[in-house]
Image (tube, rainbow, N blue to C red):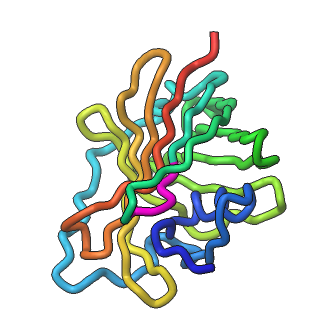
Amino acid sequence: MHDERFPWPRRSLLHTMAGLALLPMVAASPAAGAPVAGAVPIEPPPPGRAGEFDFLSGDWRIRHRRLKDAARDEWDAFEGEATCWSILGGVASIEELRIPARSFSGMGMRLFDSEQRRWFELWTNAKGASLTGPGMPGGFRDGAAVFEADDTDGEVPIRVRSTWDRIAPRACRWQQSVSRDGGRSWATNWIMEWEKKA
């Protein structure tokens, strides 16, 4: 069954592999999509630096909320956990995400390109999927990390965004949003509330 609310590859992997929904994979490279006519330009983030994702290092409990039905504002809630490491002097942040109730695990990577001075986010999973494309570009602005790119859902141009915000010593939040009008409006379809374990 095709579900247009969840187009980004990171969460498509979660849906497909965790049995949350049956979703098609979108273009391998998030930056490869054609922008919507009249789209709001993607504002490049300020120059970044290695170590900005060190806050993720450690063991976490995660409360997930995934949008099931936008018309009914119906959400699916479930628990997960993650272990994260900062390596190579903060140039890479590695995340092992686990959802025991769904027999799922995946790996996220945030990699810092020192020449471009910005971050790229990539995903794979324990079923053997490979990393593809350059990753979702992004960086920090006003205390939040935003990754955003034009993409396609099948042949339909979309824009995808992931945001790390509410960053505190023992908590943070990750959200996924999708725009079908070139960034003029956004619909959030996945929220992860992170709480660091003692």
Q: Position of residue 62 (x, y in %)?
A: 59, 32
- Name the residue rendered at 67%, 32% in the picture: 81
114 lies above or below 129: above
Q: Is residue 183 visible?
A: yes
- Name the residue rendered at 45%, 54% in the picture: 74
- 39 inside magenta stretch: no
The residue lying furthest to the front in this view is 72
Residue 24 lies in what quarter of the image?
Answer: bottom right
The total number of labels drawn is 0
Q: Position of residue 9 (x, y in %)?
A: 57, 65
Q: Position of residue 22 (x, y in %)?
A: 67, 71
Residue 195 placement, left or right of 16 = left
Residue 150 placement, left or right of 185 = right
Residue 5 placement, left or right of 181 = right
- Name the residue rendered at 70%, 57% in the picture: 124
Q: Position of residue 1 (x, y in %)?
A: 63, 79
Give 114 or 196, whichever is nearer the viewer.
196
Magenta stretch prevailing secondary structure: strand
- Name the residue rendered at 58%, 58% in the picture: 11
Residue 43 lies in what quarter of the image?
Answer: bottom left
48 lies above or below 153: above
Give 20 or 130, whichever is nearer the viewer.
20
Q: Is residue 113 visible?
A: no
The residue lying furthest to the top in this view is 198
Specify the segment rendered in magenta.
Answer: 66-70
- 67 inside magenta stretch: yes
Quadrant containing the C terminus is top right
